[in-house]
Image (cartoon, rainbow, N blue to C red):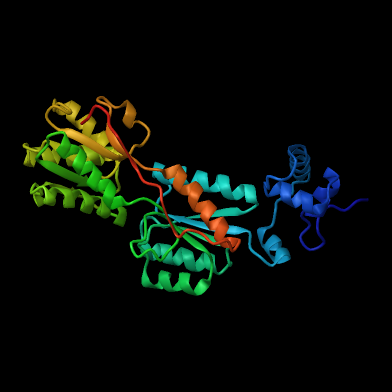
Amino acid sequence: MTRIGSRSTGRPTLNEVARLAAVSPITASRALRGIATVAPELVEKVRAAAQNLGYVANPAARALASSQSQTVVVLVPSLTNQLFIETLEAIQGVLRTRGLEVVIGNYHYSPVEEENLLRTYLANRPRGLLLTGFDHTPAVRQLLAASGVPCVHMMELDPARGAYCVGFSQEQAGAEAARHLLGRGRRRLAYIAAQLDPRVLQRGEGFRRVLREAGLHDPALEVMSPLPSSIGLGGELFAQLMETHPDVDAVFFCNDDLAQGATLEALRRGIAIPERVALIGFNDLPGSAHMVPRLTSIRTPREAVGQRAAQLLLGLMEGVAQVPQVDLGFELVMREST
């Protein structure tokens, strides 16, 4: 009688998977981790054997055997925001082909929650860290410095140029929105923002700076809400703005979902876009190109940020010298709403 499973747990082992697939244990391990150098036909055989035996990989045992974790921790502030989903998919596409496991933590825009997650994950000695932005508690900064774990920040650029980061200038993107609207002859420019994280505030500062330089900044035309960004909220905030300041002739929104909601609210109220009010969004999310009218937006390189950040982290983990700051820029996509 052939016994299946380890003596201690009774679960199927990697050696048994390898034996059934007629490959070496090393090849079986690489195939199950998705390493690209393993031939596709061998990957298929190993996966079939693992499924047949009910084998589930044990990351802790793998790390113990190799004396090194195969985990990369990625911390993002939201898993419901489309822009982070695209970035995460790009990260996984890069790291999984190298046999690395991606662990995702969602800290809900709370620096304190981010700190708690980081303490938990660092206890397991991950190979690397991918973090969103630079809005960290002092304790997080100390943890990162003391851990020695390679780390790359995403979505923002470090003004001090001391940290490894991949992103673009949020402030310059906001400034570009203002310059575009001024170039279209608009003079009463408003800013509507929600989910007031540091990136949203940086966009607002860039927008504000250009208006100040033009002598057209009016603080009363800034509508800022701490609530999560959404289509519904965009409609509400736009309605409030137009009721209190009917002379507004252009609005920059910190995110496209707010701008999409405003477009729908304008349609309900009979406010002509862009004849009476020009609208410009941010992130160029799916749907913006199909609004009526089609929405002008600042397109951000969400997928490219994930890919390049993962590649930069791989280089750091392998001890290869890297350029610390990667600016991927942004693009103004002009459509009918301006």
Residue drawn at point x = 27 percent, y = 52 percent: 171
Residue 112 position in % (x across, y down): 38, 65
**Viewer-proximal residue among 102 and 207:** 207
Residue 321: x, y in percent? 54, 62
* Residue 100 placement, left or right of 138: right
In the image, what residue occupies the spot 79% across and 57% down? 10
Percent of width and height locating residue 297:
29, 36
Q: Quadrant of residue 285?
A: top left
Q: Residue at x 91, y 51 (%)?
A: 2
Question: Could you tell me residue 160's position as x and y percent?
Answer: 35, 65
* Residue visible at 16% across and 36% down in the picture: 183
Which residue lies most toward the right here?
1
On screen, residue 42 above or below 12? above
Give left or right: position of 289 versus 130: left
Is residue 13 visible in the rendered image? The answer is no
Q: Quadrant of the C terminus?
A: top left
The quadrant in which residue 135 appears is bottom left
Q: How many tags in the picture?
A: 0
Quarter of the image for residue 229 reads top left
User: Could you say which is closer to the camera, residue 162 or residue 250?
Assistant: 162
The reply to whether residue 55 is visible in this rendering is yes
